[in-house]
Image (tube, grey):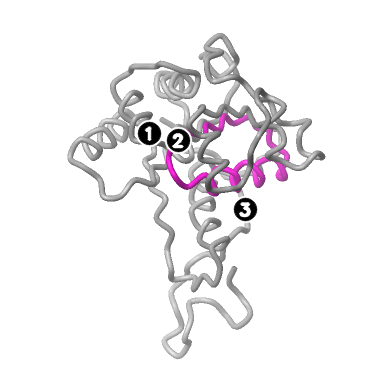
Amino acid sequence: MSEPRNRPAADRSFVVGLTGGSGVAYGLRLLDVLLRDGAHVQLVASDAARRVLRHEAGRDLRAGADGLRELVAPELRERLAVFPIDSVESTPASGSAPIDGVVICPCSMGTAARIAHGFSTNLIERAADVALKERRRLIVVPRETPLSTIHLRNLLLLAEAGAVVLPAMPGFYHRPATVAQLVDFVVARILDHLGVTHELVARWRTPDPDATSPWNEGEGP
C-alpha cells in the first residue's frame, strides 16, 4: 500500500463509518474537520451508532439519511452523502469508486472482528473490505478497554492485511486542558494517516533543555 500524500482534504473523497463503539465524539469531529477542509464525505452509521449518538452526544436523530445530515452544519451538507447501513449496492461498496480512504471511527470490536475475517454484513464492513482489497487506506479506531486476546488477534489480522489500527488513545504531552483537545489529538493522528494537512495540534519537537515545554511560549493547541 502506498503512503498517503500529504495535502489538503479539498476535493478528496473519504468514507466515514460510525459504529456502536463508545467514543462517537471522535467520529463527529473527524467528519466536521474533513468537510470544513473541502473533502467529500460518504457517511454510514449503524443502528447501534445512532443509539450511542443519543446517549453520548445527546443527538436524538430523525430516522433515515436526513437525520444523519443534521450531524453537520447546514453549510457543509452539500459535500456530505449519507448511505443506509444495508445499502451494499452504494458507492462505498464498489472497488471502482474513486475513494481516497475509509475510516471507521469509532470501530466496535464486533465490526473489527468481521472485517478481519472478511465477513461483511453491512455497508461499513463492505467498504472496509473493499479498501483492503484495493490497497486503499483503511483506518480503524477502536476504543475498547481492556482488550481480550481475541480482540488483539483480530486487530493484528487487520494490521497484517494493511489497515492502520489507530486506537483512541490521546497523548498528554501537549498538556490538554479540555476534552475537545484530547479528541483533537486522536483526530489529528487520523488525518496524518489519511495524508491530510491540518493544524489541529502542535507538532512535537525536541525540547529546549532550558524550556519547560516542547513548544515556545504561546504555542500549543
Q: Amino acid at mark 2?
A: Gly
Question: How many numbered tags mark residues here?
Answer: 3
Foreground residue among 82 and 187: 82
Q: Check the image and report above or below for 61 versus 121.
A: below
Q: Check the image and report above or below for 143 versus 113.
A: below
Foreground residue among 34 and 24: 24
Q: Amino acid at mark 1?
A: Ala
Q: Position of residue 81 (x, y in %)?
A: 68, 25
Q: Amino acid at mark 3?
A: His
Q: Which residue is mark 3?
A: 198
Residue that appears at 60% across and 29% down? 43
Label 1 to label 2: alpha-carbon separation? 20 Å
Q: Position of residue 91 (x, y in %)?
A: 60, 15
| The C terminus, quarter of image | bottom right
Furthest residue in direction left, as rendered:
149
Q: Secondary structure at mark 2?
A: loop
Label ID, residue 116: none
Label 3 to label 1: alpha-carbon separation? 22 Å
The part of the image, by quadrant, that contains residue 66 is: top right
Foreground residue among 194 and 78: 78
Q: Is residue 196 left or right of residue 204?
A: right
Residue 187 magenta: no
**If you read the primary sequence from the N terminus, does the residue marked by circle 1 or circle 2 appear first?**
2
Label ID, residue 20: 2
Residue that appears at 35% across and 31% down? 112
Q: Position of residue 77 (x, y in %)?
A: 76, 33
**If you read the primary sequence from the N terminus, does the residue marked by circle 3 or circle 2 appear first?**
2
Q: Secondary structure at mark 1?
A: loop
**If you read the primary sequence from the N terminus, does the residue marked by circle 3 or circle 1 appear first?**
1
Q: Position of residue 217 (x, y in %)?
A: 60, 83
Query: Which stretch did the figure color magenta?
Result: 12-40
